[in-house]
Image (cartoon, rainbow, N blue to C red):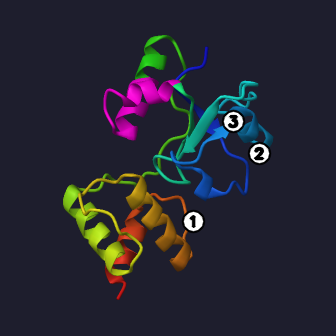
Amino acid sequence: GLPAAEEVILPRGFPLDLADTTVEKPIQAWAQMGVKRAGGAALPNASEPSSIILPAGWRGPAFILYPNFKAVMNWNRSTLYALSVTILAQQIAGGPPVMQTPPGDDEPLSRSTIIDMQNRLAALTLYTDEVDGLLGPKTRSAVRMYQKQIGLPADGHPTPEFVRRLQQAR
Protein backbone atom coordinates (compact mmCIF):
# COMPACT_ATOMS: atom_id res chain seq x y z
CA GLY A 1 0.00 0.00 0.00
CA LEU A 2 2.99 2.35 0.01
CA PRO A 3 4.26 4.23 -3.03
CA ALA A 4 7.83 3.65 -4.17
CA ALA A 5 8.90 7.10 -2.92
CA GLU A 6 7.50 10.44 -1.91
CA GLU A 7 8.78 13.90 -1.23
CA VAL A 8 9.38 14.77 2.41
CA ILE A 9 10.35 17.74 4.56
CA LEU A 10 13.32 17.23 6.85
CA PRO A 11 13.40 18.86 10.26
CA ARG A 12 15.89 21.59 11.03
CA GLY A 13 19.20 20.04 12.09
CA PHE A 14 18.53 16.72 10.34
CA PRO A 15 21.83 14.75 10.25
CA LEU A 16 22.68 14.87 6.54
CA ASP A 17 24.84 11.74 6.71
CA LEU A 18 21.61 9.75 7.26
CA ALA A 19 20.31 10.85 3.84
CA ASP A 20 21.79 7.94 1.91
CA THR A 21 20.42 4.82 0.23
CA THR A 22 22.73 2.73 2.41
CA VAL A 23 20.96 3.93 5.58
CA GLU A 24 17.66 2.20 6.24
CA LYS A 25 15.33 2.89 9.15
CA PRO A 26 11.73 1.94 9.84
CA ILE A 27 9.34 4.59 8.54
CA GLN A 28 8.26 5.24 12.14
CA ALA A 29 11.87 6.06 13.10
CA TRP A 30 12.06 8.78 10.44
CA ALA A 31 8.73 10.15 11.67
CA GLN A 32 10.05 10.23 15.24
CA MET A 33 13.00 12.29 13.97
CA GLY A 34 10.51 14.86 12.60
CA VAL A 35 10.42 13.87 8.92
CA LYS A 36 7.03 14.72 7.36
CA ARG A 37 5.42 14.40 3.96
CA ALA A 38 6.01 17.40 1.70
CA GLY A 39 2.54 18.80 2.39
CA GLY A 40 3.19 18.61 6.14
CA ALA A 41 1.22 15.41 6.82
CA ALA A 42 2.67 12.65 8.95
CA LEU A 43 4.50 9.74 7.37
CA PRO A 44 2.62 6.43 7.27
CA ASN A 45 2.58 4.64 10.61
CA ALA A 46 4.53 1.66 9.32
CA SER A 47 7.66 -0.25 10.23
CA GLU A 48 8.92 -1.05 6.72
CA PRO A 49 12.57 -0.17 6.07
CA SER A 50 13.06 3.07 4.19
CA SER A 51 15.80 5.51 3.22
CA ILE A 52 16.00 9.26 2.77
CA ILE A 53 17.80 10.79 -0.21
CA LEU A 54 18.75 14.31 -1.25
CA PRO A 55 19.29 14.04 -5.02
CA ALA A 56 20.12 17.75 -5.32
CA GLY A 57 21.80 18.07 -1.93
CA TRP A 58 20.51 19.76 1.20
CA ARG A 59 19.24 22.77 -0.80
CA GLY A 60 16.89 20.67 -2.95
CA PRO A 61 13.99 18.31 -2.42
CA ALA A 62 14.22 15.32 -0.07
CA PHE A 63 12.56 11.97 -0.70
CA ILE A 64 11.79 8.91 1.37
CA LEU A 65 12.29 5.63 -0.47
CA TYR A 66 9.92 2.84 0.52
CA PRO A 67 10.50 -0.88 -0.18
CA ASN A 68 8.76 -0.64 -3.59
CA PHE A 69 11.57 1.65 -4.74
CA LYS A 70 13.86 -1.38 -4.91
CA ALA A 71 11.50 -2.94 -7.47
CA VAL A 72 11.88 0.15 -9.66
CA MET A 73 15.66 -0.06 -9.22
CA ASN A 74 15.58 -3.58 -10.69
CA TRP A 75 14.86 -1.98 -14.07
CA ASN A 76 17.72 0.51 -13.91
CA ARG A 77 20.38 0.86 -11.19
CA SER A 78 20.35 4.67 -11.34
CA THR A 79 18.69 6.18 -8.28
CA LEU A 80 17.85 9.35 -10.24
CA TYR A 81 16.27 7.32 -13.05
CA ALA A 82 14.19 5.28 -10.61
CA LEU A 83 13.13 8.43 -8.75
CA SER A 84 12.13 10.11 -12.03
CA VAL A 85 10.04 7.10 -13.06
CA THR A 86 8.38 7.06 -9.63
CA ILE A 87 7.54 10.77 -9.68
CA LEU A 88 6.25 10.58 -13.25
CA ALA A 89 4.04 7.57 -12.42
CA GLN A 90 2.61 9.40 -9.41
CA GLN A 91 1.87 12.50 -11.49
CA ILE A 92 0.19 10.42 -14.24
CA ALA A 93 -2.01 8.96 -11.48
CA GLY A 94 -2.98 12.50 -10.39
CA GLY A 95 -0.36 12.93 -7.66
CA PRO A 96 1.33 16.21 -6.83
CA PRO A 97 4.41 17.60 -8.54
CA VAL A 98 7.66 17.94 -6.62
CA MET A 99 7.15 20.91 -4.31
CA GLN A 100 10.75 21.89 -3.49
CA THR A 101 12.65 23.13 -6.52
CA PRO A 102 16.29 22.16 -6.98
CA PRO A 103 18.90 24.89 -6.56
CA GLY A 104 19.27 27.08 -9.65
CA ASP A 105 23.05 26.76 -9.73
CA ASP A 106 23.01 22.96 -9.55
CA GLU A 107 24.25 21.39 -12.75
CA PRO A 108 24.75 17.81 -13.89
CA LEU A 109 28.33 16.61 -13.77
CA SER A 110 29.94 15.17 -16.86
CA ARG A 111 31.47 11.72 -16.68
CA SER A 112 34.95 13.28 -17.09
CA THR A 113 34.28 15.61 -14.12
CA ILE A 114 33.21 12.66 -11.97
CA ILE A 115 36.33 10.71 -13.02
CA ASP A 116 38.48 13.70 -12.10
CA MET A 117 36.63 14.02 -8.80
CA GLN A 118 37.11 10.31 -8.01
CA ASN A 119 40.83 10.56 -8.81
CA ARG A 120 41.24 13.63 -6.60
CA LEU A 121 39.29 12.00 -3.74
CA ALA A 122 41.45 8.87 -4.15
CA ALA A 123 44.59 11.01 -3.92
CA LEU A 124 43.23 12.31 -0.62
CA THR A 125 42.67 8.65 0.44
CA LEU A 126 38.92 9.22 0.72
CA TYR A 127 37.90 7.11 -2.28
CA THR A 128 39.22 3.58 -2.70
CA ASP A 129 36.85 2.06 -5.25
CA GLU A 130 37.17 1.78 -9.03
CA VAL A 131 37.32 5.09 -10.89
CA ASP A 132 34.30 4.64 -13.16
CA GLY A 133 32.79 8.10 -13.67
CA LEU A 134 29.58 7.13 -11.86
CA LEU A 135 28.22 9.09 -8.93
CA GLY A 136 27.30 6.01 -6.89
CA PRO A 137 27.10 5.39 -3.14
CA LYS A 138 30.88 5.02 -2.63
CA THR A 139 31.63 8.25 -4.49
CA ARG A 140 28.91 10.06 -2.54
CA SER A 141 30.40 8.71 0.69
CA ALA A 142 33.84 10.07 -0.27
CA VAL A 143 32.25 13.41 -1.24
CA ARG A 144 30.54 13.48 2.16
CA MET A 145 33.86 12.87 3.97
CA TYR A 146 35.59 15.68 2.07
CA GLN A 147 32.63 18.01 2.64
CA LYS A 148 33.07 17.42 6.37
CA GLN A 149 36.80 18.16 6.12
CA ILE A 150 36.29 21.49 4.37
CA GLY A 151 33.27 22.63 6.39
CA LEU A 152 30.51 22.21 3.79
CA PRO A 153 27.16 20.55 4.59
CA ALA A 154 27.96 16.83 4.34
CA ASP A 155 25.12 15.70 2.08
CA GLY A 156 27.21 13.74 -0.45
CA HIS A 157 26.08 15.99 -3.32
CA PRO A 158 28.94 17.59 -5.26
CA THR A 159 27.91 21.20 -5.80
CA PRO A 160 29.81 23.50 -8.17
CA GLU A 161 31.52 24.98 -5.07
CA PHE A 162 32.54 21.51 -3.90
CA VAL A 163 34.04 20.63 -7.30
CA ARG A 164 35.93 23.95 -7.41
CA ARG A 165 37.33 23.47 -3.91
CA LEU A 166 38.32 19.86 -4.63
CA GLN A 167 40.11 20.96 -7.80
CA GLN A 168 42.04 23.58 -5.78
CA ALA A 169 43.05 21.09 -3.07
CA ARG A 170 46.66 20.06 -2.87
CA separation, marks 2 and 3?
Answer: 11 Å
* Left or right side of 106 for 156: right
Magenta-drawn segment: 68-87
Depth check, front residue: 76 or 107: 76
Mark 1 secondary-structure assignment: loop
Earlier sequence position, callout 1 versus callout 3: 3
* Quarter in which the C terminus is drawn: bottom left
Q: Is residue 20 visible?
A: yes
Residue plotted at (25% across, 63% down): 131
* Quarter in which the N terminus is drawn: top right
Tell me if mark 3 has few (under 14), some (14-19) or many (20+) residues whose alpha carbon lies within 10 angstroms of its own: some
Depth check, front residue: 38 or 51: 51
Residue 106 position, x and y percent, is 40, 54
Tell me if mark 2 has few (under 14), some (14-19) or many (20+) residues whose alpha carbon lies within 10 angstroms of its own: few
Where is residue 24, by image quadrant? Answer: top right
Q: Is residue 84 visible?
A: no
CA separation, marks 1 and 3?
Answer: 25 Å
**Residue annotated with mark 2:** 33
Residue 76 position, x and y percent, is 31, 32
Q: Residue furthest left?
A: 112
**Residue annotated with mark 3:** 26
